[in-house]
């Protein structure tokens, strides 16, 4: 009975919960729980109708139809079936979805590719994803040796290396320099305005690819300040005067327009920096996140890198989360949350207050965005491990667990809201269950 009740508890709770969550259906299915505290609802119980994902992107349901229970009808007009297959909870939403929630999914595949000799970049910002007001992102690819040229911008830059190895350089406002070779799963961070460069080494013959996140949703990588672009727009004699160089040919090979990304000979791996009389930056702009031991959880694992361990990263914090098959996580963030799926499949229902809730499905390469305070869960809906990043425009990682919140609230108060029985109350977790696995009855 315990496992059955736990199962019902998990499957019936919905982010669109109102005053009464435990349904009559669940109570009917657990008749021995007659000692449960009786709620005094002023409204009917929420439905316990299952709302499972109806198909996946690789489903044999090659032409899905928008039916959920007794609602829906077939599509008669033209329709983009591959997109329906990837978004079953938009096409046939859970009955718990309601009202309006801003679009909270952006696949990088829908971003314009800026193709260059030596690589490419594609970005996500409020131009195409209006809900994400506090963070923008760039996915950038450099072939071995290719350079994202020396540049700066007024927004801080945080990066997570996806593949390959990238050499990053910088010089701060006090003339202290920095160089690092950054490998997959590792991070870099440049404070606002600090000039920097990125270059793929040849440690991997394919070069590198990395994810950049900026704590400003309006950031555009097309608006950054590039060394070549700057010098191409300054009179030549002014450049010579600045550097005190009289040779008229000394600056005669400056590119006439910006290079942005361009090919070059790869640097040596783990190269040392130029000798600097001011020394190197006091807080490294690099963090070996890949070497951090994950905290093992009941249904997965988590690693967190914020300014408590990566001192310089005062505007971006990250959690790298793994959720095992059937597992999930349920909370609300105290800050806006930007999510990126690294592998696997997920669904997220976003609860936007006042009965508004909407469910989105995600595959690897998709971005999600959850505004601060919006309750949500992430459920692994695939057949393998779900691995994703939770990124916050904040110096600290913080979340509020639904389960822990209820466990640490007086039981009578919880019972009065949700009609839970003593056994269910006893199963609530006082220590934050960041990621939970499915009860054994799910397996
Ligand atoms: Mn940059």
Image (cartoon, rainbow, N blue to C red):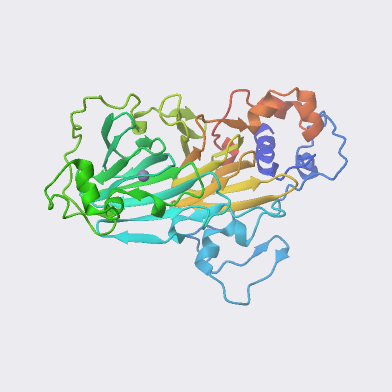
- In the rendered view, tell whether residue 183 sits above or below residue 53: above
Q: Quadrant of the N terminus?
A: top right
Decide if residue 47 is on the left or right side of residue 369: right
- In the rendered view, tell whether residue 40 sits above or below residue 70: above
* Ligand 1 quarter of the rendering: top left
Decide if residue 313 is on the left or right side of residue 404: left
Decide if residue 379 is on the left or right side of residue 149: right
Q: Residue at x 72, y 53 (%)?
A: 98
**View extreme (bottom): residue:** 77
Q: How many marks?
A: 0
- In the rendered view, tell whether residue 3 sits above or below residue 426: below
Q: Residue at x 52, y 57 (%)?
A: 127
Decide if residue 155 is on the left or right side of residue 253: right
Spot occupied by residue 363 in the image (x, y as percentages of width and height):
47, 52
Q: Residue at x 56, y 34 (%)?
A: 436
Front residue (pair 188, 52)? 188
Spot occupied by residue 416 in the image (x, y as percentages of width and height):
82, 30
Spot occupied by residue 171 in the image (x, y as percentages of width and height):
29, 34
Would residue 16 be visible to someone looking at this image?
yes
Q: Residue at x 62, y 31 (%)?
A: 400
Front residue (pair 413, 142)? 142
């Amino acid at each position: 009975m315990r496992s059955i009740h736990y199962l019902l508890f998990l499957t019936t709770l919905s982010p669109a919960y109102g005053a009464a969550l435990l349904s009559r259906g669940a109570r009917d299915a657990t008749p021995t729980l007659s000692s449960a505290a009786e709620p005094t609802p002023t409204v009917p119980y929420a439905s316990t109708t299952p709302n499972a994902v109806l198909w996946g992107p690789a489903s044999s349901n090659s032409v899905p139809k928008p039916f959920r229970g007794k609602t829906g009808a077939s599509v008669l007009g033209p329709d983009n079936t591959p997109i329906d297959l990837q978004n079953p909870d938009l096409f046939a939403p859970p009955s718990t979805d309601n009202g309006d929630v801003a679009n909270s999914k952006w696949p990088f595949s829908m971003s314009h590719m800026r193709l260059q000799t030596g690589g490419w970049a594609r970005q996500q910002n409020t131009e195409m994803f209006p809900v994400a007001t506090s963070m923008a992102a760039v996915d950038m690819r450099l072939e071995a040796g290719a350079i994202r040229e020396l540049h700066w911008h007024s927004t801080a830059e945080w990066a997570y290396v996806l593949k390959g190895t990238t050499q990053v350089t910088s010089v701060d406002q006090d003339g202290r320099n920095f160089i690092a070779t950054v490998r997959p799963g590792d991070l870099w961070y440049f404070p606002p305005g600090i000039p920097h460069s990125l270059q793929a080494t040849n440690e991997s013959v394919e070069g590198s690819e990395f994810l950049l996140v900026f704590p400003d949703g309006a950031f555009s990588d097309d608006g950054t300040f590039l060394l070549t672009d700057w010098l191409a727009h300054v009179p030549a004699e002014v450049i010579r005067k600045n550097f005190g160089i009289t040779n008229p040919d000394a600056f005669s090979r400056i590119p006439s327009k910006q290079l942005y990304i361009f090919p070059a000979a790869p640097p040596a791996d783990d190269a040392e920096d130029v000798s600097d009389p001011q020394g190197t930056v006091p807080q490294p702009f690099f963090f070996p996140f890949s070497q951090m031991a994950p905290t093992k959880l009941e249904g997965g694992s988590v690693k967190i890198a914020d300014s408590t361990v990566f001192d310089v990263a005062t505007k971006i914090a990250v959690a790298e989360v793994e959720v095992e098959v059937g597992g999930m996580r349920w909370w609300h963030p105290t800050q806006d949350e930007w999510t990126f799926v690294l592998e696997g499949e997920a669904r997220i229902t976003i609860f936007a207050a006042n009965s508004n809730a909407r469910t989105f499905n995600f595959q690897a390469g998709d971005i999600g965005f959850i505004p601060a305070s919006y309750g949500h869960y992430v459920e692994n809906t695939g057949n393998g491990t779900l691995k994703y990043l939770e990124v916050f425009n904040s110096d600290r990682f913080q979340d509020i667990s639904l389960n822990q919140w209820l466990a640490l609230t007086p039981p009578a108060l919880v019972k009065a809201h949700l009609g839970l029985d003593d056994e269910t109350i006893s199963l609530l977790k006082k220590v934050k269950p960041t990621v939970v696995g499915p009860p054994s009855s799910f397996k």
